Image (spheres, rainbow, N blue to C red):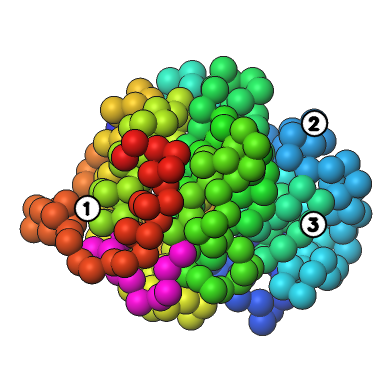
């Protein structure tokens, strides 16, 4: 498999402060491991997103507000979200990398890809920075794919610990994007309840699986096996996009989940199989959260091994996850609600 990995030292220049948990160290660790351990990956370049691209998902006034932080040593946008002198440049390149990856995927220049970028994006609203995020990278990519790449239906899977409020709001009223999120709840930002199903044409195309915490590989495997897979088959998207957050790792300081490297690999395996079945293999991931540096880099490498066809899972884990039957009451609740809109 030709797996594109988007990385750039500019992403290390976004510095929200020495004590901030969303630090350049997050990418330095995985970049160093990729340099040391190699791997048969393709490292394409990307152009930064310009104003026209950013306006696909963000207001002109908001883009101007973020652009005004360029060259300033430190700016505070909200209690969690700060910028440094090159944060605007990094944020533009992050969005541009996702768009470039989708274009390459559609042009069959790559088989799949992973944008290892920062700042992350799924909390960013159309006109507001939130939760460490400036521009909503995956939403910009999805809107570009709908407008310019001939896509009519896009599945966005968000497995970050925190609910992607910005992504949900971006597509809440449309059936052209099916947004599926697993997240710890209640937790920042407070959205992501089962009842948040979309509105108008989008009703039923927004599905949240709010988890209490403590869930690990087998729980996520069961959610994917019994809910996401039949849902995706019925929706039959043209492409699958993943907001890949590694803060569901078992040691992450911001969460209480128990996912291991094998769990991340299994979710990736399921999504690759789905993509081959319903959308000619078109699958692209972009990095969101993840704050245990070793856990995040281990998880990313496991995902990349799956994407590239090397494989990470052993037969025993694969069999266990495919047959997971752990107790998970929330799954039945979400399934019952989803059945009002889907055959499942």
Residue drawn at (82%, 61%), measured in percent from left and top? 85
Q: Secondary structure at mark 2?
A: helix
- Whether residue 325 is situated above or below residue 180 in the rendered picture: below
Looking at the image, which is closer to me, 215 or 341? 341
Stretch of the chain drawn in magenta: 210-220
**Tag in front: 3 or 2:** 3
Could you tell whether 133 is left or right of 37 in the image?
right
Q: Quadrant of the N terminus?
A: top left
Tag shown at residue 52: 2
**Which residue carries the number 3 mark?**
128
> Residue 340 at x, y = what percent?
43, 43
Could you tell whether 292 is left or right of 134 in the image?
left
The quadrant holding residue 262 is: bottom left
**Which residue carries the number 1 mark?**
312
- Crowding at dot 3, Cα within 10 Å, few <14 / some 14-19 / many 20+, comes out as some
> Residue 17 at x, y = what percent?
72, 75
Looking at the image, which is closer to me, 230 or 274? 230
Residue drawn at (54%, 62%), measured in percent from left and top? 193
- Crowding at dot 2, Cα within 10 Å, few <14 / some 14-19 / many 20+, comes out as few
Q: Secondary structure at mark 3?
A: loop
């Amino acid at each position: 498999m030709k797996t594109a990995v988007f990385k750039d030292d500019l992403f290390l220049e976004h510095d929200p402060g020495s004590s901030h948990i969303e630090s350049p160290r997050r990418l330095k660790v995985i970049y160093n491991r990729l340099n040391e351990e190699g791997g048969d990956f393709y490292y394409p370049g990307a152009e930064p997103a310009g104003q026209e691209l950013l306006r696909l998902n963000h207001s002109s006034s908001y883009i101007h507000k973020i652009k005004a932080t360029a060259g300033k040593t430190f700016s505070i946008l909200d209690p969690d979200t700060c910028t440094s002198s090159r944060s605007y440049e990094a944020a533009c390149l992050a969005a541009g990398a996702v768009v470039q990856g989708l274009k390459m995927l559609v042009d069959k220049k790559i088989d799949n890809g992973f944008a290892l970028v920062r700042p992350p994006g799924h909390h960013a609203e159309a006109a507001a920075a939130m939760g460490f995020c400036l521009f909503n990278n995956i939403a910009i990519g999805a809107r570009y794919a709908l407008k310019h790449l001939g896509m009519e239906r896009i599945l966005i899977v968000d497995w970050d610990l925190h609910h992607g409020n910005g992504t949900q709001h971006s597509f809440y009223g449309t059936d052209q994007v099916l947004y599926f999120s697993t997240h710890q709840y209640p937790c920042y930002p407070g959205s992501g309840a089962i009842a948040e199903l979309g509105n108008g044409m989008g009703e039923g195309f927004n599905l949240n699986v709010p988890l209490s915490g403590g869930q690990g590989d087998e729980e996520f495997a069961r959610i994917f096996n019994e809910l996401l897979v039949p849902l995706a088959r019925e929706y039959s998207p043209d492409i699958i996009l993943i907001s890949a957050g590694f803060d569901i790792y078992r040691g992450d300081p911001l969460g209480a989940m128990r996912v291991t490297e094998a769990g991340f690999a299994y979710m990736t395996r399921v999504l690759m199989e789905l993509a081959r079945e319903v959308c000619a293999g078109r699958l692209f991931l972009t990095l969101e959260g993840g704050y245990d540096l070793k856990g995040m880099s281990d998880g990313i490498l496991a995902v990349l091994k799956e994407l590239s066809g090397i494989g990470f899972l052993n037969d025993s884990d694969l069999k266990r996850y495919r047959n997971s039957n752990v107790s998970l009451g929330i799954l039945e609740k979400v399934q019952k609600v989803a059945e009002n809109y889907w055959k499942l």
